Amino acid sequence: RDNTPRYRIGFSQCTGNDDWRRNMLTEMKRELFYHPEMELLYRDAESDNKRQVQQIHELLAEKIDILLVSPNEAVPLAPAIAEVYNKGIPVIILDRKAATDSFTAYIGGDNYNIGKLAAEYIAGQLGGKGNIIEITGLRGSSPTVERHKGFLDALAHYPGLKLTATLEGGWEADKTRQSAINNKAAIHQADVVFAQNDVMAYSMYRYCRENGLQHIKFIGVDASPYPDAGIDLVSRGILSASLLYPSGGKEAISMAADILAGKKAARNTLLQTVLIDSSNVKLMRLQIDKIQAQHQEIEKQQSLLQEQRRLYQDQLHLLRIVATT
Ligand code: FRU
């Protein structure tokens, strides 16, 4: 089979600097193993809207055949995304949405349900009574809005639960810490912190423990499979629970391959979530370890295969030289 890439996939990532997105890229690269016809052009906007717009234009100039994009914030990124789409280049939007209908397909986790399940879990933990602090992501990114809405809608069923403050943590540890410092009084009254990702939940945990607030419990989102990330934090009892937020990396690459092969793609793909706490975290870990071992095995086989191919090519080359002399 011919191994020269024929298609260029541009991937504009809002930020590459966290475990969840590292996992997304790993999943993409794994899937790309099966698609030697595609090469990935990757750009990391480091959480900067303007930079991401500029990088989308760079990718356009590199003559990409399809764009994958996870927009930092929905409104500022909309025009650049629509521009690509209107040039006839397919666009798959990942995880965070854009404020435009000009795209081919969207793949992302069920953020509304994540918020809802978090509230129901907290209600169970607190026996329906207590004070909650919510820490949100960037106000302009769509999962912030959807997780918050799901959370509020479910809380409405529990009159004894009080959402005493919703603070912006911007998806990041440092911003979260600053918000906590600015809202000391509310945090001292809290029984539970629901943070919209594990990075912010862990930041709040550290802040609270440093300030002698031992009783507060923490719920996060993502459940990424790395040291000091969600699954690990739940198994160490630092977080009470984390809601799995699937990255969609694998799905994005196989959908891109389908679109480039002329197949039709679903307009909306919603990836399911599951709550991970002490009752199922061990099972989760076992499964992740198993999958990782399988992937390592596949990667080993792939490189052996490549080595064989190289040897074969060398021998062919030698044979030709022998034949012509
Ligand atoms: C990673 C991240 C995740 C979060 C997602 C929302 O950059 O902040 O932690 O679930 O983005 O888009």
Image (spheres, grey):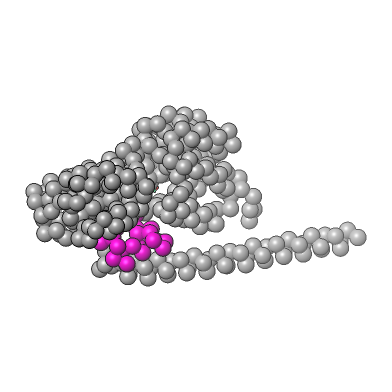
The front one of 122 and 25 is 122
**Would you place residue 152 above or below residue 63 in this image?**
below
The front one of 206 and 45 is 206
The front one of 22 and 214 is 214
| Residue 135 x %, y % | 27, 47
Question: The N terminus appears in which quarter of the rendering?
Answer: bottom right
Question: The C terminus appears in which quarter of the rendering?
Answer: bottom right
- Count the marks: 0
Report whether residue 201 is seen.
Answer: no
The front one of 111 and 301 is 111
Instruction: Tell me what residue is drawn at x 33 percent, y 51 percent.
Output: 200
Report whether residue 224 is seen.
Answer: yes
| Residue 69 x %, y % | 45, 41
**Would you place residue 193 above or below residue 175 in this image?**
below
132 sits to left or right of 253: left
Q: Quadrant of residue 79?
A: top left
Q: Which residues are magenta?
A: 219-244
Q: Is residue 228 magenta?
A: yes
Q: Residue furthest left?
A: 159
267 sits to left or right of 84: left
Q: Is residue 25 magenta?
A: no
Instruction: Tell me what residue is drawn at x 12 percent, y 50 percent.
Output: 161
Instruction: Tell me what residue is drawn at x 60 percent, y 45 percent.
Output: 6
| Residue 36 x %, y % | 58, 53
**Would you place residue 309 above or below residue 93 in this image?**
below
Instruction: Tell me what residue is drawn at x 64 percent, y 50 percent.
Output: 4
